[in-house]
Image: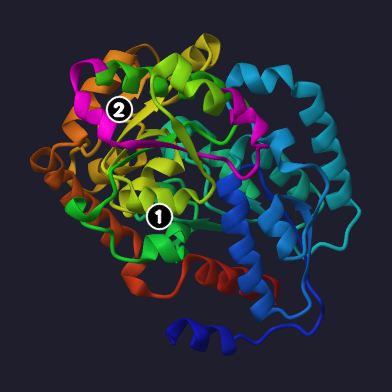
Amino acid sequence: MENKKNHNSLKLSPKTKHFFIVAGEASGDLHAARLMRALKELLPGCRFSGIGGANMALEGLESIVPLADISVVGFWEVAKRYPMFRRLLQTTASMLASGGYDAFIPVDYPGFNMRLAASAKAAHVPVAWYIAPQLWAWGSDRADNLKSLVDRLLVVLPFEPDFFHQFGIEAHFVGHPLMEDSVIEAQPIPLRQREREIALFPGSRRQEIARNLPIMLESLASMSRTAPEIADYRISVALSPTLPHAEYATFLADAHKHYGFRLESETDSKRLLARARAGIVKTGTSTLEAALCGLPHMMMYRTSTLSYLYARRLVNLSTIALPNILMEKAYGRNNVIPEFIQNTATPNALAQAMVSLLDDTITEPMMNDFATLREMLSNGHRGTASGNAARIIAEMVA
């Protein structure tokens, strides 16, 4: 009710608003779509141009490039596609310079959106950034640049306002958009009521699946040799909504021959997180989704050697899993979930961690930490993240 009251009290311009909005990956597409929906409630008739996926298209966006074409990660992987990104930046910058946009809304995706925000400012288009760049992890030296680029910074992690304020950037904590998902919003299923199922989340990009999924499968095959009880569990892999199922076809078809078990597929990733007993989850937002769904899990990630070495030079963190980062910022400890990165992400290491995850007495403390994270991200139940962000953006362009 409070959120609706805020919406109705806005004095908005009758002029139809036109937003340029860009999300570069599956999670950003979903969060941006909810923000678009909230903006349409506040600003009836508003229009959206830019880049996004299927969820944003349902809210009225006509994307100028397929989301899968730009959903790449890693220094070397991006470098190989530099000509395509350069052409796309030129196209989007020209669109912003053509005029007629009331605001540019970058949604996460900092590598591309930082450059595009500069083009927006040069064209005198206000910038309202939703889901801020994680400068606290990889680029506090870029804070001055960000300060010159944004008019509103809408953050989704509770420690971020204090971080950005030290650089003179006004940041608004709006809550976390994951809490708007109906599955995540529901109370997690207790351990003893969960299905005998192990969930695998290798990622949403082609190169992530190619590098991570074989290690995940090999770890379970290794576990079957020392912990035969694994045979009682169904093994399911979450399919990315931005990739064709053919990307997984070989693994699904050959799992029994190569690894000794049948591999199931699941298109509803949230339902899989909510019901499974344990999981192996690639780094990123998925680890936070898993925590909020109450899924005992470990984090793992492998990338190219060049991308890994480059990232190590940039990232200034003692941990990289979001549940661990949040608990470290709030309580000074970062041991919520196990992390396996690059050379430490071996089948044997993952197999040993899975044995622990299937032990209720070991995972109960993890579940208590997950409950703490849910409360931390709820923003005191003051409206939704997309609703709060939409209100701030609407006030900016009124």
Closest to the camera, between mark 2 and mark 1, is: 2
Is 217 on the left or on the right of 58, as rendered?
A: left
x, y percentage for residue 278? 29, 40
Is 14 on the left or on the right of 306, as rendered?
A: right
- Display colour scheme: rainbow
* Numbered badge on residue 161: 1
* Numbered badge on residue 339: 2
* Quadrant hosting residue 245: top right
Q: Is 31 or 134 nearer to us in this picture? A: 31
Can residue 159 be seen?
Answer: no
Give the spatial CA distance, label 2 vs label 1.
27 Å
Q: Is residue 381 magenta-colored?
A: no
Q: Is 187 or 129 nearer to us in this picture? A: 187
Q: Tell me which residue sits at (58%, 89%) in the image.
A: 8
Read off the magenta span.
Answer: 225-250
Chain-order first, disc 2 or disc 1: 1
